[in-house]
Image (spheres, grey):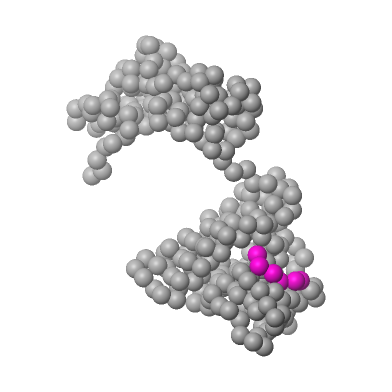
Amino acid sequence: MATGIAARYNAGMGTHVDYTAADTWQRVAAVLETTDIRPAARCGNVRCEPGWDWRVDLTDHDLWLAVAGHGRFELEGEAIPIQPGTLFWLRPGFEGMATQDPASPLTVIYAHFDFFDRAAARPVAIAPELLPAPHVPLRDPGRLEMLLARIVRLIQMPVPLGAVEARLLLQQALLEVYRQDALNHGVTTVQPDLRIAAVLTHLHRHPAHRLSLAEAAALASLSPDHFSRLFRAHTGTSFRQYAVHARLTRARHLLEETTLTVGEVAEALGYPDVFLFSRQFKAGFGVAPSRIRDRHPDLATTGPLPIATARVGCQARE
């Protein structure tokens, strides 16, 4: 009988993330950001031997990915076929039995892990409604297979900073599982559109350039109307509003991190006069640019940096 953490998971065996809830991704992010997710020594990338079977009785989490072969997983009373691309996110307290087809032996990558309280350094239970479904058929297993294989190599063949890299890769692996699980439930996570990304890069790299809507649309190889709709869908704002915000954000960085005066920042960012710049800056940040400069009086005593250098933020760190 499951006790402790395992019992808390058993209470919600059929429960998993509702990807349609408004705050789902924020709550999932909070779990991933506030807990210490540690891979365990129990991991492997193996071809199962003839006669292999696995009696599942877990006290931690396990990402279990079939990369070749076929079999069957009896998990919590449900019979699930195993084939390449079948993933299980097994939780503490789960019980079951996995077998393979003798004519098609399984090759499996698995990695045990757990969530730890950062302060107390002890395992913590994650609410079942914040975890993906235990069985996640992968539409594209390639990336997850690569991540898990790398985690296994780092654990089995320790290298300097390998433990740190393994933890970071494990977080990426969990993110990939969440994304594909969401897709299985009809929810598509928005991925950056490379055409819009090219325009965003231009806006941030060349804030002084007043890119017109038509020019931005041409850069994205889209019609202006289609570009406007797609841009708003990806950024939540209009092209013009985003361009102004990118310019003002760069202005604030220059005021905080370089020796340029307010007038020099306005000139560097292509404003025809300092008054327009000041008015736009105050509208955007609720404070005059001179106030930002006044908070960093030490910068004003070291002499100005060349504008070209200031534009790319190349300032030596002490």
Residue 141: x and y, percent?
A: 61, 60
Residue 219 seen anywhere in this rendered image of the structure: yes
Q: In terms of depth relative to the viewer, which is nearer, 301 or 206? A: 206
Asked whether 84 falls inside the magenta stretch, the response is yes
Asked whether 285 falls inside the magenta stretch, the response is no
Q: In terms of depth relative to the viewer, which is nearer, 277 or 148? A: 148
Corner quadrant of residue 181: bottom right
Quadrant including the C terminus: top left
What segment carries the magenta color? 80-85
Reply above or below: 151 against 53: above
From the viewer's perspective, is 254 left or right of 234? Answer: left
Residue located farthest toward the front when viewing the structure as drawn:
103
Residue at 60% in and 74% down: 108
From the viewer's perspective, is 187 left or right of 165? Answer: right
Reply above or below: 250 against 271: below
Residue 268: x and y, percent?
A: 33, 21
Quadrant including the N terminus: bottom right
Residue located farthest toward the bottom when viewing the structure as drawn:
51
The image shows a total of numbered marks equal to 0
Residue at 40% in and 31% down: 205
Reply above or below: 9 against 264: below
From the viewer's perspective, is 314 left or right of 91? Answer: left
Residue at 50% in and 18% down: 212
Residue 155: x and y, percent?
A: 45, 73
Residue 93 seen anywhere in this rendered image of the structure: no
Q: In terms of depth relative to the viewer, which is nearer, 261 or 134? A: 134
Q: In terms of depth relative to the viewer, which is nearer, 195 or 287? A: 195
Corner quadrant of residue 94: bottom right
Residue 165: x and y, percent?
A: 43, 63
